[in-house]
Amino acid sequence: MWLEYYPHVVSYARGDIDQAFAQAYRLPIPKHSPFAIGYTFKGKPHHYLPDAVGTLSNGQLVIAEAGMEDDKRGDRNLAKAEAARRLAHLQQGVFWIGTERSLTNRRYYNLAFLHARRKMFPAFADIAEAIASIWPWEKMAEVQR
């Protein structure tokens, strides 16, 4: 939700959707997913898939991770975060970590308030009805620009 309402975020998508996850949950794979970041932990190479990857209004890359603070302080998660921070820095972007301690109660409740009162655009129902009549439920289709 934070990325959704942050005014400088132009676009974002999940960075942690790989082929197996997409098939298991019947999800399309976003354009830049999986966004694998290589790191080393205990002398062995691994890859890490951040929660979200996007673009800011100034064109910078944003890599975002969310979770519980205690989990994010584990050795392996610290290695992942350092690799993501380093990659974002090399690409002149930013790396954000959101935890229950970095998101104030006031900000949380403001975001929840905004989300609960989000309105659909006026023609949404008409568009949804038209699409449903020609696009069967649970069928994948490619969208061309």
Image (cartoon, grey):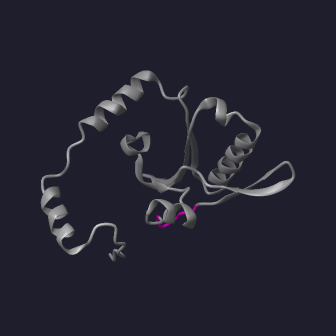
Q: Which residues are magenta?
A: 30-34
Report the label total.
Answer: 0
**Quarter in which the N terminus is drawn:** top left
Q: Position of residue 99 (x, y in %)?
A: 55, 32
Q: Is residue 118 above or below residue 134?
A: above
Describe residue 36's horizontal placement relative to residue 61 as left or right. right
Q: Name which residue lies at 71% across and 45% down.
A: 82
Q: Is residue 144 magenta?
A: no
Visible in this render: residue 18? no
Q: Is residue 18 above or below residue 87?
A: below
Q: Is residue 134 above or below residue 86?
A: below
Describe residue 37's horizontal placement relative to residue 41 as left or right. left
Q: Position of residue 44 (x, y in %)?
A: 84, 55
Residue 72, located in which quarter of the rendered image? top right
Q: Is residue 139 above or below residue 53?
A: below
Q: Nearer the viewer, residue 3 or 130?
A: 130
Q: Position of residue 80 (x, y in %)?
A: 70, 47
Q: Nearer the viewer, residue 24 or 80?
A: 24
Q: Nearer the viewer, residue 2 or 88?
A: 2
Residue 38, located in which quarter of the rendered image? bottom right
Visible in this render: residue 104? yes
Dominant secondary structure, magenta: loop
